[in-house]
Image (spheres, coloured by chain):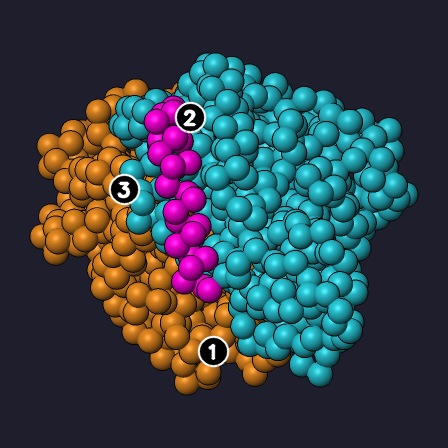
Chain colours: A orange, B cyan
Amino acid sequence: MAYFDAASAAPLHPVARQALTASLDEGWADPARLYREGRKARLLLDAAREAAAEAIGCRADEVVFTPSGTRALHSGIAGASAGRRRTGRHLIVSAVEHSSVLHSAEVFEAGGGTVTRVAVSRTGAVTPSAYEAALRPDTALACLQSANHEVGTVQPVAEVAEVCRAAGVPLLVDAAQSLGWGPVEGGWSLLAASAHKWGGPAGVGLLVVRKGVRFAAQGPVDERESGRAPGFENIPAIVAAVASLRAVRAEAAREAVRLRELTERIRARVPRTVADVEVVGDPERRLPGIVTFSCLYVDGEALLHELDRAGFSVSSGSSCTSSTLTPSHVLKAMGVLSEGNVRVSLPAGTAEADVERFLAVLPEAVAGVREKLGAPAPVTAPRAGEPAGELVVDSLGKRCPVPVIELAKVFGEVPVGGTVRVLSDDEAARLDIPAWCEMRGQEYVGEEPAERGTAYLVRRVS
Amino acid sequence: MAYFDAASAAPLHPVARQALTASLDEGWADPARLYREGRKARLLLDAAREAAAEAIGCRADEVVFTPSGTRALHSGIAGASAGRRRTGRHLIVSAVEHSSVLHSAEVFEAGGGTVTRVAVSRTGAVTPSAYEAALRPDTALACLQSANHEVGTVQPVAEVAEVCRAAGVPLLVDAAQSLGWGPVEGGWSLLAASAHKWGGPAGVGLLVVRKGVRFAAQGPVDERESGRAPGFENIPAIVAAVASLRAVRAEAAREAVRLRELTERIRARVPRTVADVEVVGDPERRLPGIVTFSCLYVDGEALLHELDRAGFSVSSGSSCTSSTLTPSHVLKAMGVLSEGNVRVSLPAGTAEADVERFLAVLPEAVAGVREKLGAPAPVTAPRAGEPAGELVVDSLGKRCPVPVIELAKVFGEVPVGGTVRVLSDDEAARLDIPAWCEMRGQEYVGEEPAERGTAYLVRRVS
């Protein structure tokens, strides 16, 4: 069995387990109490805060422990935007943020604010100039992830922070995917992270609010954690979170090299052993352990099931939308193929042999799914002498990847210059039909509303 | 050493520790994932939810795990009141609820709602008729604790639920202090609780929303926990919380009898061995393990320090306001003496010998604090033949219990019929001067604004 989904949750680090069980006896009492048990708990909490601050590169009194990374983001965005309400009600986020950020932005909009969603390149990266262009005199807050959770692309945080700082706008960085690898560079104002992403226990998030950043905590008043995270502190888990952060940091430089080599192997090998695959995300500026690819004519969930049977735990699309039928917002923003999407995220310590075994198993797993779905053979050469006409493919009511498969199946019949009109009511088609055209070197003409669903027009050019 | 502050946080139950460490290996993955590790985590979570539902007496799909009891209350009140926004914007709470509830009520008011705070008797209990009188056509929600966290008084929850049900208003019950002792009776609509109060780990709260109760979760959308508790689930802690709930429930009937006898001993013995003590809270309808008393002429914090030195961990006043200078809102609402307040809350398994030792140590501890503060000797008989005049005591700038001490010191000089005017800017004086009068059989005339602070008028009647 090999677990390759560290970007969802990393297995508990042995140091986290040890610290957790060791502090259960000392860390259960209320740290606000002055008696012996309370003082012991307070000492543990204070020491953890100091150590966390050192790992982050901030002051201890800037660190707030929250119950999760999601709550850190929710509270951070709500508090920082409310703190600058007088400046204005404009928020900037990238289009590929974690759903916690995007859902916070929706709440901000519902409350009368406006949101700019900064577009990304085909590799998933924003540009500092796009953030600069998005800044307005009424911008209360800008948010940017340090690295993308789905494709591993590293964002230019320090440069964006500089642009924001010049405009006097605080930048909140979602460092959930990167904090285990190292501190976030640059002059950011707020930072959020999640312990279970680096091998800490569940139940611990981090919110850092730099001194001088205006912050108005929302929701009912509570005295814990400087009034920024209500509820009784989970000290044993906090201690374990911080201890494991230090432990993974100690191994980070060496492990980053090793995992980067392993993911590079996947990036290079998969397109050679599996036909019709698109590897997505930045090939250079990326996290060491994440590699993501999409397979044409493949149902992502079926492929995950095949891989699970073969002993590999990977995920598909966005972690928070995988149970819905819409394609991942990240892949959508990047404009890449979404069907048959697989994210491999290697935990620290992944054995080379497991990666090799994965590479050996993958082609057959993909072939199996394609066979079940009746995926088409490679497109045949166009027949000569036929008039250029229009062929209609009715894929209404059929889910990804069927519309693309049906398009590909008829394409052999289409003469050069002829068009195919694919009728589909599946959201993924909007992304995958253009992606198919790009992969096949055919022309994507565009979409238009149909009686039911949408018509996607493709012209055969070769 | 004896820890007598279970109402703040109970020491981790051995079953909780065992379940927590056992489930660290199986419960760390994302339960939303379909691969092997995710399925294992999901099984643990589902089993915990079933077991929690059984202990509460509800359906499994009505149970939501939150990161703390505080968050359960915050989310429960926000969601239930928003769910009935069309009915109206009126909220009912008792005056002695936990600060999490009262702070939620403040947010509700800040958002344009109105709040009725139901008064309590001198024992800390509400009456069903007071809730009935508070109900209005626009009442969205009523909240009531199952038992008070500071004085242990049990509230008539089933009767209040009946009154609310007749009016079509949902009742949210804060069962934080009682759930370990047994399910909450009656037709409540929502229920909140906190695992670390019954010996479970920190990081787990419970929110139960009965089917059919209108509920509109507030804050950013999140798919976890039926959309009612955002953030990655803390499964090992949830498993430990539920396992320990079952364990304490198995011991509850026997342990309740034992602890009730021990707290009864404290209730009876303290007034006999310590002068000028008021035992507060209902003597009959109360939790087994909590007993609270206030000592005249005593600084609560100094007494806690003395008791800590003697090896006893107890708390004073409201857990959430002990670091501020205002007296506990619970004691205030009850109209009882607040100075020198001590709450003893015995954890399950408390040894009889420890309680006896506490009773032996307490008189000396109180005497020590009184001596340091220069507490007065008993009031002497009034001198005969002196004209009734007014004596002014200037206690401005002096903190509880000094104003009462200074009142008592001059009282010997006052003839029957004479009055003392105590000038004080300490909030506790408003509570403690009338309480002193009641304890001494003297007449509390009332208060009036003074140039600085408030003047409290006391007339000598014997």
Mark 2–mark 3 Cα distance, whole angstroms, equals: 18 Å
Q: Is residue B251 above or below residue A95?
A: above
- Residue A139 versus residue B115 in the image, above or below: below
Label 3, secondary structure: give it. loop
Q: Are marks 2 and 3 on the same chain?
A: no
Q: Which residue is mark 3?
A: A26
Count neighbours of disc 2 (C-alpha within 10 A) and say few if under 14, some if 14 to 19, many if 20 or more.
many
- What amino acid is found at the position of numbered circle 2 in the picture? Ala
3 or 1: mark nearer the eye: 3
Tag 2 near tag 1, CB within 8 Å: no
Q: Are marks 2 and 1 on the same chain?
A: no
Can residue B306 be seen from the camera position used here?
yes
Q: Where's residue B298, x and y in %?
A: 50, 56
Q: Nearer the viewer, residue B3 or A21?
A: B3
Please report, as a chain letter, where disc 2 is located. Answer: B
Residue B146, picture quadrant: top right
Q: Which residues are magenta?
A: B348-374
Chain containing the residue with disc 1 = A
Badge 1 crowding class, 10 Å Cα cut-off, few under 14, some 14 to 19, many 20 or more, is many
The chain holding disc 3 is A
**Residue A169 marker:** 1
x, y percentage for residue A112? 68, 66
Which residue in the rendered view is the most extreme toward the front?
Answer: B385
Q: CA distance from mark 2 to mark 1?
A: 53 Å
